[in-house]
Image: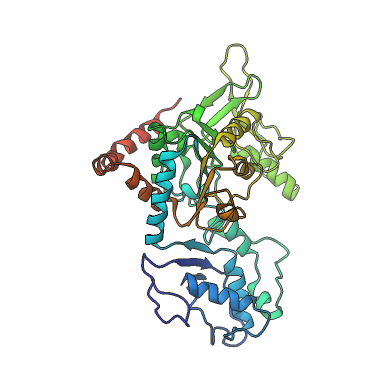
């Protein structure tokens, strides 16, 4: 990789370089004049750029400077850099990451109640896109409405009257952000590492904000897993509350789309399914079209996914809270810690406890890692890279080799589980 800053004296970026990756919305069409003249950044064709950490910090400081900065930046490029800053993904050097992994491994060994708190970032390697970051779902949607040409010309953000959603953002909810059906997703290295640590008694509980079902597929038993936002493979009876774990995606997206179009556009070409019922909270449909087979119940089955405005399931939240309170080491992996009330659980760990945050984006709780009384660790980068380094510290070399080799068989086991129709 090469640093995108034209002012960089050593453009080469190696694995031992702390780097920042960003993406900005380039102007649609041509602006008047040669607007790329004298740019300080070599922006990629899609608006991507990568920098040494020091080079990026220099650019941001220059853009934010109230007095005359050390370098001249055009109004056009200031606009691009400001938008890019919203997407910044940070990566620590490999050497630093290994040093911190050794500390994490030591803390895991000494912990009496270690809890993992996971987000979308641990599933990106499986094929699911995250939400915030340079390629995140919400980032792309935000950037799709930015009229960067107007921003450059007038110095203010002027979004179009109607949100523009690019074609590659559309598609069925039955697929992950990158178009991979949920049934084809498999646990990542981080999923498997957490289950391995749980098997060895080193991780007591996992609190997850993900609905992809990958923790359960990796082997984590339900009693040690709090899926705060539900699971696309689990449906429950709205009457007797019996839960059904399926090998297939349970949600009825057609019914939800029916209500969504009526709400947003006032009309729809979709014929309302007979079982459909609008949720009073989220406005979508939770019914899946199947019925409970529990005795004489036969109530309508509902998906367990928590949509915007839905309430979290009380029992699941209470179990998560109980484990967070007991926690003396919390591993926050792949989450920007923005969604409440889930992220509030991080604040419940013991006052003398330790907080690890591993994520590519900055979070509002990064300061807790350096807060007095907390032996916090902050790592910027991919969770799989960190966890691989942690596992090398915790496992004997022969055990590590065997475990890595057995991944092929584990994949076959996952395939079998997803192929089974329950």
In the rendered image, the residue lying farthest to the top is: 296
Q: Nearer the viewer, residue 414 or 33?
A: 414
The answer to whether residue 408 of the structure is visible from this angle is yes
Q: Nearer the viewer, residue 318 or 178?
A: 318
In this rendering, position of residue 337 left or right of residue 191: right
Percent across and percent down for residue 318 are 63, 30
In the rendered image, the residue lying farthest to the left is: 398
Q: Nearer the viewer, residue 394 or 340?
A: 394
In this rendering, position of residue 149 left or right of residue 331: right
Percent across and percent down for residue 152 are 65, 78
Percent across and percent down for residue 348 are 62, 40
Give the residue displayed 76% in from the left and 47% down from the top.
266
**How did the renderer colour the structure?**
rainbow
In this rendering, position of residue 307 left or right of residue 404: right
Query: Considering only vertical position in the picture, is 25 above or below 187?
Result: below
Query: Considering only vertical position in the picture, is 174 above or below 273?
Result: below
Percent across and percent down for residue 236 are 59, 26
Q: Nearer the viewer, residue 136 or 386?
A: 386
Query: Considering only vertical position in the picture, is 414 above or below 291?
Result: below
Give the residue displayed 73% in from the left and 44% down from the top.
262
In this rendering, position of residue 176 left or right of residue 143: left
Residue 192 quadrant: top left
The N terminus lies in quadrant = bottom left
The answer to whether residue 50 of the structure is visible from this angle is no
Q: How many marks on residues? A: 0
């Amino acid at each position: 990789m090469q640093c995108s800053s034209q002012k960089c004296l050593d453009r080469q970026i190696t694995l031992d370089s702390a780097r920042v990756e960003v993406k900005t919305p380039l102007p649609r069409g041509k602006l008047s004049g040669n607007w790329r003249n004298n740019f300080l950044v070599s922006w990629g064709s899609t608006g991507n750029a990568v920098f040494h950490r020091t080079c990026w910090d220099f650019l941001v400081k220059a853009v934010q400077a109230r007095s005359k900065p050390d370098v001249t930046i055009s109004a056009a490029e200031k606009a691009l850099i400001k938008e890019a800053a919203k997407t910044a993904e940070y990566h620590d050097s490999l050497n630093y990451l290994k040093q911190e992994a050794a500390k994490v491994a030591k803390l895991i060994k000494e912990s009496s109640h270690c809890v993992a708190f996971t987000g979308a970032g641990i599933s990106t390697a499986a094929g699911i896109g995250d939400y915030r970051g340079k390629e995140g779902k919400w980032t792309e949607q935000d950037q799709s409405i930015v009229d960067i040409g107007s921003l450059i010309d007038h110095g203010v953000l002027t979004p179009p009257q109607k949100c523009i959603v690019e074609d590659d953002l559309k598609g069925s909810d039955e697929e992950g952000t990158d178009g991979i059906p949920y049934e084809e997703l498999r646990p990542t290295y981080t999923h498997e590492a957490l289950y391995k640590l749980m098997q060895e008694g080193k991780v007591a509980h996992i609190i997850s904000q993900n609905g992809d079902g990958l923790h359960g597929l990796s082997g984590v038993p339900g009693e040690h897993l709090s899926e705060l936002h539900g699971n696309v493979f689990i449906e429950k009876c709205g009457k007797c509350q019996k839960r059904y774990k399926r090998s297939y995606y349970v949600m009825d997206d057609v019914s939800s789309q029916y209500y969504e179009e009526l709400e947003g556009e006032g009309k729809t070409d979709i014929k309302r399914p007979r079982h459909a019922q609008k949720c009073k909270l989220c406005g979508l449909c939770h019914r899946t079209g199947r019925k409970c087979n529990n005795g004489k119940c036969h109530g309508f089955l509902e998906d367990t996914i928590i949509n915007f405005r839905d309430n979290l399931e009380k029992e699941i939240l209470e179990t998560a809270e109980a484990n967070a309170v007991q926690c003396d080491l919390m591993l926050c992996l792949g989450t920007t810690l923005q969604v409440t009330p889930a992220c509030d659980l991080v604040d419940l760990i013991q006052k003398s406890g330790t907080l690890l945050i591993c994520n590519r984006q900055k979070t509002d709780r990064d300061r807790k890692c350096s807060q007095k009384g907390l032996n916090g660790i902050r790592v910027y980068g991919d969770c799989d890279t960190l966890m691989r380094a942690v596992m090398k510290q915790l496992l004997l070399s022969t055990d590590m080799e065997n475990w890595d080799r057995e991944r092929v068989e584990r994949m076959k086991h996952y395939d079998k589980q997803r192929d089974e129709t329950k």
